[in-house]
Amino acid sequence: MGLVESVKTERVCDLPWREAAMLGEDASVASAIEQMRAKQIGCAFVVDEMGRPLGFFTERKVIELLASGYENLDDIQVNEHLDEAWFSVNQNAPLCDAVDAIQRRHARFLCVTDDEGRALGLTGQKGFAEYVAEHFPQQVMVQRVGGKPGLETREGA
């Protein structure tokens, strides 16, 4: 089965995804940054009391806040600074739904949800790239960073 067929038949739960930083609506920006650092990810979900995502808080928002002159991030609630464009995808949805959000909507991060809409984890551009590299290594060309291509042919596992 090729990449196109896999994207149509495989499910989102087949993508690599990571444990997400999840925050309550009243969490501070400082606590969001702490969780994002601890989990080494670039965003945190704000979830309701049932665990359903309400929005994303991203590292981009942190930069905007710091550039705007905010000094005490403990006093700022994260729900006041959520990213306007965020996307979620059900774990049982076909991969093409995730690819659509990544490609057409330019989503870096996707919230993976269960059938009740509760946040389970995080995937996105990186998760899809890891999926392609793992399942289709013959289609991935290896290059040295900052130089001429290291290999003229594709490298497979």
Image (cartoon, helix red, strand yellow):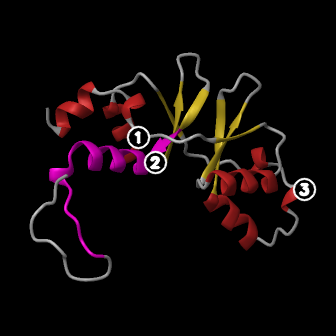
The single residue placed furthest to the left in the displayed view is 153
Callout 3 crowding tier (Cα within 10 Å): few <14, some 14–19, many ≥20: few
In the image, 17 versus 84, the foreground residue is 17
- SS majority, magenta: helix
Residue highlighted by disc 1: 101
Residue highlighted by disc 2: 107
The single residue placed furthest to the top in the displayed view is 116
Q: Quadrant of residue 74?
A: bottom right
Q: Amino acid at mark 3?
A: Asp
Is the residue 94 above or below the residue 36 in the image? above
Q: Tell me the SS state at disc 1.
A: helix
Name which residue lies at 14% across and 71% down. 151
Name which residue lies at 61% across and 41% down. 20
Pinpoint residue 144: horizontal percent, then vertical percent: 27, 75
Question: Is residue 77 a member of the stretch shown in magenta?
Answer: no
Q: Which residues are magenta?
A: 122-144
Q: Tell me the SS state at disc 2.
A: loop
Q: Amino acid at mark 1?
A: Ala
Q: CA distance from mark 3 to mark 1?
A: 33 Å
In the image, 110 versus 84, the foreground residue is 110
Left or right of residue 106: residue 112: right
Residue highlighted by disc 3: 75
Pinpoint residue 80: horizontal percent, then vertical percent: 77, 48
State yes or no: discs 3 and 2 in contact (Cβ < 8 Å): no
State yes or no: discs 2 and 1 in contact (Cβ < 8 Å): yes
- As drawn, the label of residue 10 is none
